[in-house]
Amino acid sequence: MMNLDLTGKRALVAGSTQGIGKAIAMQLARQGAEIILIARNEEKLIQVKNELPTPASQEHHYIVADFSFPPQLKVLIEDWLELNGNIQILVNNTGGPAGGPITEAKEEEFIKAFNNHLICNHILAKALIPGMKEAKFGRIINIISTSVKQPLAGLGVSNTIRGAVANWAKTMANELGQFNITVNNVLPGATNTVRLKSIIENKAAKTGKTVEEISQQMANAVPMKRVAQPEEIANAAAFLASPAASYINGINLPVDGGRTGCL
Ligand SMILES: NC(=O)c1ccc[n+]([C@@H]2O[C@H](COP(=O)([O-])OP(=O)(O)OC[C@H]3O[C@@H](n4cnc5c(N)ncnc54)[C@H](OP(=O)(O)O)[C@@H]3O)[C@@H](O)[C@H]2O)c1
């Protein structure tokens, strides 16, 4: 029987008050993990914490943090670990960078996205790795984007930073495999979340088309003729977090209904 059980394990899930992050937190909790949520909005954090399943009578927690302030995040996570002990599963995730053509991107936008994505991932990973080594079990899962494989039109800053995060992750995987810590990336395609809604609205405003037309175009670009539900992304992340995924390391897993055109 494939082992998906996460009872007795702790999972820090970032960007987890809505969308893909929340769906991942819900799924990992269903598999028995104790969840530590992170986001900026405390009200929403409390609400999600109360929604999380507790099949193993596990306790869930949250940390209020803003990824726009990496040094603060570092202090918050280090203090939390000192007080509460180790975490074995890390899901790196946060809101995506603003859209726009790369030729119009401002330098500050790259720096902001680099901080929010790469630097915050690094801070969390560095803080958790010693505990993962101690447990002789660790999972680092980064929610990135299919732009790791093929740039997406109109997402210049995002495409650039996603490439950096993917290379960071692959290098981490090379260094950490020997400790039974795996590092893998999940690459969502278009997924039905608030983030997608705002991308569709922006495109509609720019092209003069209706929101329905843009949504239809987006669905038509996918071999499966629909966008994903957040739970479908969460299932892939939860599998990678499980003991069953013990020999999967250093991969980029598109969960995009087949949209990405390359192998
Ligand atoms: N949805 C898609 O179609 C799609 C496709 C490909 C890739 N992705 C990528 O997958 C990731 C998640 O997407 P999503 O659609 O689930 O996003 P989302 O609905 O916008 O949710 C983002 C989550 O991150 C938190 N967050 C945002 N900014 C933060 C900050 N500065 N500090 C701390 N937490 C922050 C938000 O909570 P608070 O507001 O409370 O902080 C929220 O819980 C993003 O990187 C996105 O670009 C999404």
Image: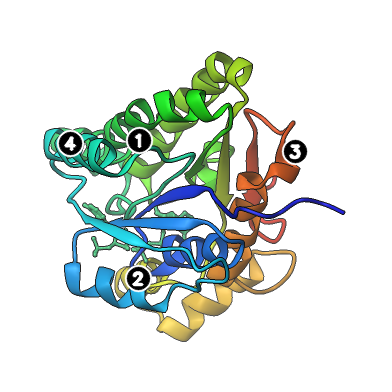
Query: Decide: marks 1, 4 in contact (CB < 8 A)?
Result: no
Q: Earlier in the sequence, mark 4 or mark 2?
A: 2
The reply, left or right, for residue 188 in relation to residue 113 is right
Closest to the camera, between mark 3 and mark 4, is 4
Query: Decide: marks 3, 2 in contact (CB < 8 A)?
Result: no
- Dot 1: what SS? helix
CA gap, disc 3 to disc 1?
27 Å
Q: Amino acid at mark 4?
A: Pro
Q: Amino acid at mark 2?
A: Lys
What residue is rendered at 57% in x and 57% in y?
A: 189
Q: Is residue 157 above or below residue 47?
A: above
- Dot 4: what SS? helix
Res. 105 visible in picture: no
Q: Is mark 4 within 8 Å of ligand 1?
A: no
Name the image colouring.
rainbow
Closest to the camera, between mark 4 and mark 2, is 2
x and y, in percent, of residue 121 in the image = 35, 35
Q: Earlier in the sequence, mark 3 or mark 2?
A: 2
Q: Earlier in the sequence, mark 3 or mark 1?
A: 1
Q: According to the image, label 1 marks what residue?
A: 121
Q: Residues within 10 Å of mark 4 (few under 14, many from 20)?
A: many
Residue 263 tag number: 3
Image-quadrant location for residue 259 = bottom right
CA gap, disc 3 to disc 4?
35 Å
Observer-nearest of 173 and 251:
173
Residue 70 tag number: 4
Q: Earlier in the sequence, mark 3 or mark 4?
A: 4
Image-quadrant location for residue 203 = bottom left
